[in-house]
Image (cartoon, rainbow, N blue to C red):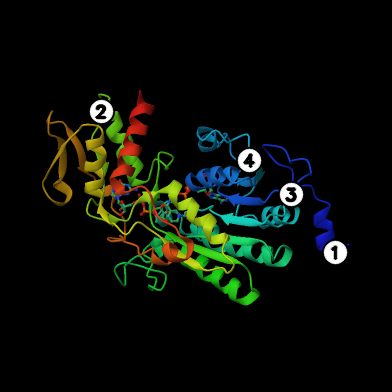
């Protein structure tokens, strides 16, 4: 018996949801990282488009489907055990769950943690992608593949704004691993004629954003203060600038990339860059909390103009060993070829997130 024939005898048992009855063909997609921010929004988009949506979920002591439940789709997706560090998972999955489109969104996605876990980050975010690509090329070469590349690859930026042709200069183990993943995706596309595309996505956020990322840390902290809490938000570098958009807009761009006849790489960004400090002010204004900023460096603070309460202070513990100071993307290729445009600007995003967190604290 060949390895493929043996694999065919192995059932890939879903851990949540049921394998649908065979019948009218629906397009099928697999999303690694379906429990994350982007995975949840992408699953919702694909379900709305009529896809049968499968997703990978790591085994955990607790149920990690909170985001899918928030969007009301936890029962509509079919979940499979999948860890990108485990080649056997990937092999069995791809052999037994054939799909038209495979979106690789799983990652150790927190840049700050990547200095504490550089090897793990490299294994999941870099080598994990090679594991998927090689399995796809062996078992399912017709499957269209999306890789979640990132503006963090630009790091110490070599041009402003950054576009698909801007050289990479990663500034973290996270960025370095993602640069490997990007290059190996391009290499498999060119070596094996695979329909493999990379979305170089600039920061995108939402009310489903992980609590450790700066935008959500800010909106959760402000919501607590607006509800009477008195702990100031402790932040690191307030002057770093990011090009922030809404995650719901960005997953539409991922899908559009895989609908193109030819694969390719695309920047998705708003083209507007904003310092962390201004994001705090926008979110605070959405909660009727005008701020005054005073001081410099580690002595900088923000206070509520109406009450004099301290709202933000700087804690050097949140500085990074190497910082990405400025990101601003040029998404003209995506605009031209995909017809993609972000619909939410940074002020709208800060308002959406602050109000959602304010309601959640109630
Ligand atoms: P996220 O919320 O942190 O979600 C990451 C997902 O990956 C989670 O479902 C997580 O599972 C899963 N995961 C982590 N390690 C894994 C492993 N070893 N095996 C299998 N699954 C694993 O991230 P996101 O914001 O949605 O981002 C999605 C992707 O886009 C990531 O690859 C990220 O690096 C990339 N990206 C994000 C942005 C952004 O601004 N959001 C920008 C550019 C690129 P658990 O739920 O078990 O933790
Ligand atoms: O930091 C500064 C921090 O952790 C943004 C991921 O989705 O986007 C994300 O990576 C900036 C940095 O996101 C705090 O130093 C200040 O300059 O929200 P972040 P990130 O590092 O940009 C990219 C595109 C991805 O691909 C990643 O997966 O904010 N900052 N004070 C802080 N950051 C955090 N987290 N916490 C602070 O207290």
Closest to the camera, between mark 2 and mark 1, is 2
**What distance separates the C-alpha of mark 2 from that of mark 1?**
63 Å
Instruction: Please tell me which residue is depicted at 37% across the width and 33% down the height of the picture.
Output: 356
Q: Position of residue 152 (x, y in %)?
A: 39, 61
**What distance separates the C-alpha of mark 4 from that of mark 1?**
32 Å
Label 2 CB-ligand 2 distance < 8 A: no
- 91 lies left or right of 4: left
Q: Are marks 2 and 1 in contact (CB under 8 Å)?
A: no
Q: Earlier in the sequence, mark 2 or mark 1?
A: 1
Closest to the camera, between mark 4 and mark 2, is 4
Q: Position of residue 63 (x, y in %)?
A: 57, 34
- 242 lies left or right of 62: left
Characterize the local packing of mark 1: few (<14), some (14-19) or many (20 or more) Cα atoms within 10 angstroms.
few
Q: In front here: 128 or 266?
A: 266
In the picture shown, does residue 17 fall above or below 24?
above
Q: Are marks 3 and 4 in contact (CB under 8 Å)?
A: no
- 12 lies left or right of 108: right
**What distance separates the C-alpha of mark 1 from that of mark 3?**
29 Å
Q: Are marks 4 and 1 in contact (CB under 8 Å)?
A: no
Could you say whether the residue bearing mark 3 is in a helix, strand or loop?
loop
Q: Tag on residue 2?
A: 1
- Label 2 sits on residue: 226
Characterize the local packing of mark 3: few (<14), some (14-19) or many (20 or more) Cα atoms within 10 angstroms.
few
Q: Earlier in the sequence, mark 2 or mark 3?
A: 3
Instruction: Please tell me which residue is depicted at 75% across the width and 52% down the height of the picture.
Output: 96
- Most extreme residue toward the right is 1
**What distance separates the C-alpha of mark 4 from that of mark 2?**
36 Å
- Label 4 sits on residue: 77
Q: Which quadrant holds residue 359?
A: top left
């Amino acid at each position: 018996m060949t390895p493929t024939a043996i694999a065919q005898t192995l059932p890939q048992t879903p851990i949540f949801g049921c394998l649908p009855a065979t019948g009218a063909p629906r397009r099928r997609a697999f999303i690694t990282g379906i429990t994350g921010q982007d995975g949840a929004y992408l699953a919702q988009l694909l379900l709305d488009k009529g896809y049968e949506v499968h997703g990978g979920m790591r085994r955990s002591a607790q149920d990690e489907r909170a985001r899918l439940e928030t969007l009301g789709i936890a029962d509509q997706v079919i979940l499979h055990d999948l860890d990108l560090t485990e080649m056997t998972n990937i092999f069995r999955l791809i052999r037994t769950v054939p799909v038209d489109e495979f979106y690789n969104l799983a990652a150790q996605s927190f840049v700050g943690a990547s200095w504490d876990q550089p090897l793990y980050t490299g294994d999941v975010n870099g080598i994990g992608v090679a594991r998927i690509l090689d399995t796809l090329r062996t078992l399912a070469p017709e499957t269209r593949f999306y890789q979640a590349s990132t503006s963090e690859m630009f790091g110490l930026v070599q041009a402003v704004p950054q576009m698909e042709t801007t050289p990479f200069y990663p500034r973290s183990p996270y960025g370095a691993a993602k640069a490997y993943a990007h290059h190996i995706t391009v290499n498999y596309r060119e070596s094996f004629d695979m329909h493999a595309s990379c979305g170089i996505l600039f920061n995108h956020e939402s009310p489903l954003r992980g609590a450790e990322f700066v935008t959500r840390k800010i909106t959760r902290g402000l919501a607590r203060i607006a509800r009477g809490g008195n702990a100031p938000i402790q932040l690191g570098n307030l002057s770093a600038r990011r090009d922030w958009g809404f995650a719901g807009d960005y997953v539409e761009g991922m899908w559009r990339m895989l609908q193109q006849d030819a694969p390719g790489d695309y920047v998705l960004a708003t083209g507007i860059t904003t310092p962390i400090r201004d994001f705090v002010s926008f979110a605070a204004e959405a909660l009727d909390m005008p701020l005054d900023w005073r001081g410099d460096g580690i002595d900088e603070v923000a206070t509520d103009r109406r009450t004099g309460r301290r709202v933000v202070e700087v804690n050097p513990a949140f500085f990074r060993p190497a910082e990405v100071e400025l990101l601003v993307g040029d998404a003209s290729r995506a605009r031209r070829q995909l017809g993609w445009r972000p619909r939410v600007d940074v002020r709208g995003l800060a308002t959406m997130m602050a109000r959602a967190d304010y309601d959640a604290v109630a």
